[in-house]
Amino acid sequence: MILTFDAVAEPVPGPKWAARWNRSWPAYETWFIARGGDRGPSQKKCREALKRYMPELISTYDRLVAVAGGSDRAARFLSTWCPPTYLGGCSLAAVGNKKDVRLVRNYDLSPELNEGLLLRTEWSGRAVMGMVEFLWGLSDGINDAGLSVALAYGGRSEVGKGFGVTTIVRYVLEICDTVEEALLALKRVPSHMAYNLVLADASGQTASVELAPGGGLKIMPKAVATNHQSGKILADQPTFTRTFERRAYLENLQSKPRKLNRKFLRSPLLQDRYAQGFGTLFTAEYDPKALTLGLTLKGARWDQAIHEFAEGQRTIDYAQEIVSEATNNAESGDWGGINWSQAASVDWNAVAQDYANGCGKEISTYFLSETADLLEAA
């Protein structure tokens, strides 16, 4: 339940990125093998796909592969072409006008499943700052033109031929200045799974798109997103993720840009189910005009700016939140209508792990014969 967040600046991939690779690759390699990555496209096909769809990233990709040691498996992993499935839970919204604009996201998952890395780079000659996933992709970020992007899992485990979405977010921020340019790029780069993106730029323009597995996108009428998409396809585990409740709240949200962040720090957007492996690990507030990011980590604010970036570290203990939540509920007698005799026998961490790994199982399969793991953790 402890996650350390590091803020790191490195203009081109070098010793700092190599250190992160050496630290994280053993776990990623285990995941890659277990999820069938070795049965995926060859290294040659992976590089060809990257060169076809995102040629501006080829030189950076080649350097990353070299720094990582140059192995075949590392090269295929870093390409994120047709990768194993992976999911995540988030709430996103952007509000803008000519005077002000904000993009805010909550990142909801188990502390074990986030890299905790805020990285500032100049890989393509421009400054990009964001939260890293898969060692060079981004779950959210901003560039020196003010373009900001954040992603959320689209709620279905269907897979198509495409790239991991975190690499797509990186690509958009490396080559685009505006939301309009980003939408054009997103139309031609296929995602391997269903994902939702919310975007904002320095002009105040905002957008939300649904990426379809294998390619294609749908522009949504409002710049908000949670963990399902429009249409007839049902979302995975909507009760567990509370995606419809969160989406309804965002759809009805009336907020000025400067006040948007505070809306994400309360229910129903703020998730405090850390014992279930589904709590808000951080809230990220991007200001495209000021070129800044404000991270809220369990109530504590950590501000960064593209042109005044400061390396540092924050360690967050999410277990304290579990104890506090359990104590408050016990004192008030308010358990939210939950059937704790049933809930106590669920391995909630297994639910979250399985959800994040894209297995798509129902929560009911996790009822155990043992007792009260959840209550004992609290």
Image (cartoon, rainbow, N blue to C red):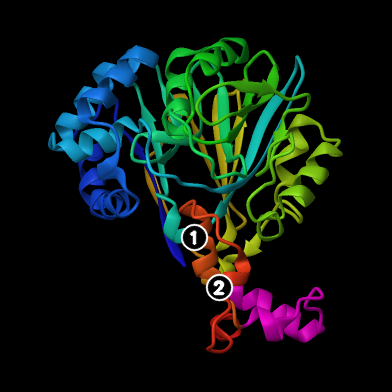
Horizontal arrangement in the rendering, residue 147 relative to residue 245 (left or right): left
Q: Nearer the viewer, residue 214 or 302?
A: 214
Q: Is residue 136 above or below residue 221?
A: below
Label 2 crowd bin: few (<14), some (14–19), many (20+), radius 10 Å: some
Q: Is residue 146 visible?
A: yes
Residue at 16% in and 33% down: 67
Q: Quadrant of residue 260 in the image?
A: top right
| Residue 44: x %, y % from top left | 21, 24
Which residues fall within the magenta stretch?
Answer: 320-344
- Asked if residue 331 lies in the magenta stretch, the reply is yes
Q: Which residue is mark 1?
A: 354
Q: Nearer the viewer, residue 4 or 64?
A: 64
Q: Quadrant of residue 279 in the image?
A: bottom right
How far apart are the two marked residues, 1 and 2, measured between alpha carbons?
Answer: 10 Å
| Residue 41: x %, y % from top left | 28, 32
* Dots 1, 2 in contact, CB < 8 A: yes
- Which quarter of the image is occupied by the C terminus? bottom right
Q: Is residue 321 visible?
A: no
Residue at 74% in and 54% down: 266
| Residue 322: x %, y % from top left | 60, 73
Q: Which mark is residue 344?
A: none
Question: Tag 1's secondary structure?
Answer: helix
Label 1 crowd bin: few (<14), some (14–19), many (20+), radius 10 Å: some
- Asked if residue 17 lies in the magenta stretch, the reply is no
| Residue 264: x %, y % from top left | 71, 47
Amino acid identity at mark 2: Tyr
Q: Which residue is mark 2?
A: 366
Sequence order check: which comes first, mark 1 or mark 2?
Answer: 1
Amino acid identity at mark 1: Asp
Prevailing SS of the magenta stretch: helix
Question: Tag 2's secondary structure?
Answer: helix
Q: Is residue 343 above or below residue 16?
A: below
